[in-house]
Image: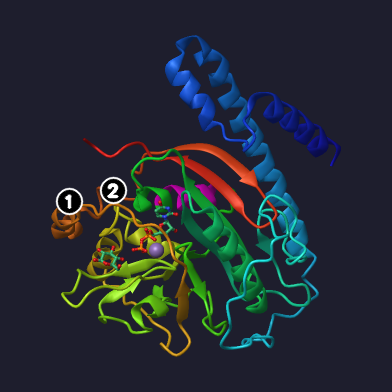
Amino acid sequence: MILTSIWNLIYIIQRSLFYNNHGYKYMHRNVRQQNNISINYFESMDQFEETYRTFLHSFLKNYLSISNSRNISLNYCPPIPPDLRGPLTVNEVPIDFSLRMNSSYHHDVKFGGYYQPKTCVARHKVAIIVPYRDRREILRHFLFHTHQILQRQQLDYRIYVCEQAFNKTFNKGIVMNSCFKEILKFQPDTPCFIMHDVDLLLIDDRNMYTCPTFPRHLSVAIDKFRFYLPYTSLVGGVLGMKYFPDKRGFSVFYLAMRREHYLLVNGYSTEYWGWGGEDDDMYARIISKELKVERPPASIARYKMLKHTHQKLNPARMKFLRTAQTRINSDGVNNVKYHLLSTSFYHLYTHFLIDVGEAPK
Ligand code: UDP
Ligand code: BGC
Ligand code: MN
């Protein structure tokens, strides 16, 4: 503990001296690009960050294994969580709820957005991956709403907000794959991943965020699509996956996926810049590896979509979709290129800030 405190103290001092208010190191990368003189200086900061991160990860891992063993005398949680409420209404976010401070509405959530039931041993350990960039109010609403549900589901879970740095074209595939890799470094025993768009709020807590045998498409009925699944080959997110677009329209997918299945399909393609296609590509991968997609009944897999600005449509998406199956092994989590700019822990989430590079010109 003493060693930890010393490390934390050094870290806080160096962050407050060298980082901007948000703790974002990428600001310094900008400086570095503009001013070669500062290169060595900031390279050494990178090493410091790396060492600190390794240390922190191993500390947290040890801490977590201690807290797991604390539960040895407890029984498993019941197969059907007793506190589920069924259909939910979406409440406004209280003004005093802030992402930077400890939330008085989420007492039991531990630092880093981690939770473990107190009275029983969770049957499911899951990582929630939230791809993110520049939708602060939506993120605030998502975290306020979703934590309360996941606790009632009696999961052992952690919410990871995976933020694409810089204001450039979004690449969800790279964000997902890099986040998946970082989670496995941090918590190598994570068996189940829920890929979750930030703008979808679950409105029935019986839709369990767990990984069954096959990938599971969780967002079957979304208010934006009048709670109607446009076509059955859609799969998608809480891993959003679906097959090639249908003339009738589309749907958004959420997908829950076991770690070994994510690796089997080689994660997401990294070729889709801007809006559209990456989830269709994922569906093509799943089918090509002869996996099935499970889906809970539409009566409970219900979501409200929060309003947001729209990304620029990617005109190249159909070109890549046509070759989706041929690129599975050469384009994905096995060769994703990115730079992890920072790892931060807030009360309600663990934050990875990721530089995904730029779309080819
Ligand atoms: N996203 C984001 N900021 C962006 C673009 C995308 O946070 O600028 C994330 C966010 O989680 C969002 C998801 O990527 O829910 C899917 O993108 P978007 O909502 O634009 O597409 P839709 O699924 O609504 O068609
Ligand atoms: C896009 C997908 C999207 C879906 C639903 C499709 O046309 O290719 O990426 O998820 O529409 O909006
Ligand atoms: Mn959206």
In the foreground, 295 or 231: 231
Image quadrant containing the N terminus: top right
Examine the rendered structure and indicate whether residue 120 appears above or below residue 257.
below
Residue, far right: 2
- Whichever of callouts 2 and 1 sits on the residue coming sooner in the sequence is 2
Q: Which residue is mark 2?
A: 273
**Is residue 147 shown to the viewer in this render?**
yes
Q: Which labelled disc corresponds to residue 316?
A: 1
Asked if the stretch drawn in magenta spans residue 181, the answer is: yes
As drawn, the residue found furthest toward the top would be 37
Which quarter of the rendered image does ligand 1 occupy?
bottom left
Q: Position of residue 103 (x, y in %)?
A: 74, 60
Q: Is residue 27 above or below residue 243?
A: above
Q: CA distance from mark 2 to mark 1?
A: 9 Å
| Relative to 94, 66 lies left or right | right
Looking at the picture, which amino acid does disc 1 mark?
Ala
Name the residue: 52% across, 76% down: 202
Q: Pick whichever, 326 or 242, lies toward us.
A: 242
Residue at the spot 59% in from the left edge and 59% down from the top edge: 140
Residue 69 in the magenta stretch? The answer is no
Neighbor class of circle 2 (other Cα within 10 Å; few <14, some 14-19, many 20+) is many
Among the 4 quarters of the image, the one containing residue 229: bottom left
Specify the segment rendered in magenta. 177-185
**Residue 209 - label:** none
SS type, badge 2: loop
